[in-house]
Image: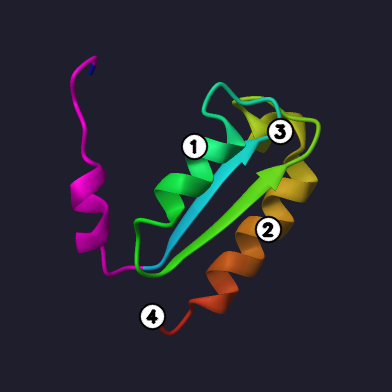
Amino acid sequence: LKTFDARSDLQKINAPCWYVCGEYDEMTPASTEAFSKLSKNAKFSVIENASHTPHIEQRSIFMQQASAFLNGHADS
């Protein structure tokens, strides 16, 4: 994956996308947000006090946001 770059393909995704990362993620909030802006129908969020596993470190917050995202796109 060292030379793999799929940024140009992100604009081809028509399904709703949720780009999420932890506040201290190795996939930084700045880079995650930049990727989210390349998709047409994307939501971006940062889970505070979490690293690369916000679904474990801040489970209740992650699940609330995941539920809100999924419920907001139930008809998509």
Q: Is residue 14 magenta?
A: yes
Quadrant where the C terminus is found in the figure: bottom left
Q: Residues within 10 Å of mark 1 (few under 14, many from 20)?
A: few
Q: Amino acid at mark 4?
A: Ser
Of tags 3 and 4, the one toward the viewer is 3
38 w.r.t. 27: above or below? below
Point 60% across, 38% down: residue: 29
Query: What is the three-letter code of the residue carrying label 3?
Result: Glu
User: SS at mark 3?
Assistant: loop
Residue 50 sits in quarter = top right
Q: Mark 2 is on which residue type?
A: Gln
Question: Label 2: how many residues lie within 10 Å, few (<14), some (14-19) or many (20+)?
Answer: some
The location of residue 61, given as percent across then percent down, is: 77, 49
Residue type indicated by callout 1 = Ser
User: Which element is circle 1 on?
Assistant: helix
Q: x and y percent of residue 52 in the render? A: 59, 25
Please tell me whether mark 1 or mark 2 is closer to you in this view: 1
Instruction: Report the residue marked by disc 3.
Output: 23
The residue segment tinted magenta is 2-15
**In this rendering, which labeled residue sits more in front, label 2 or label 3?**
3
In this rendering, would 19 be left or right of 68?
left
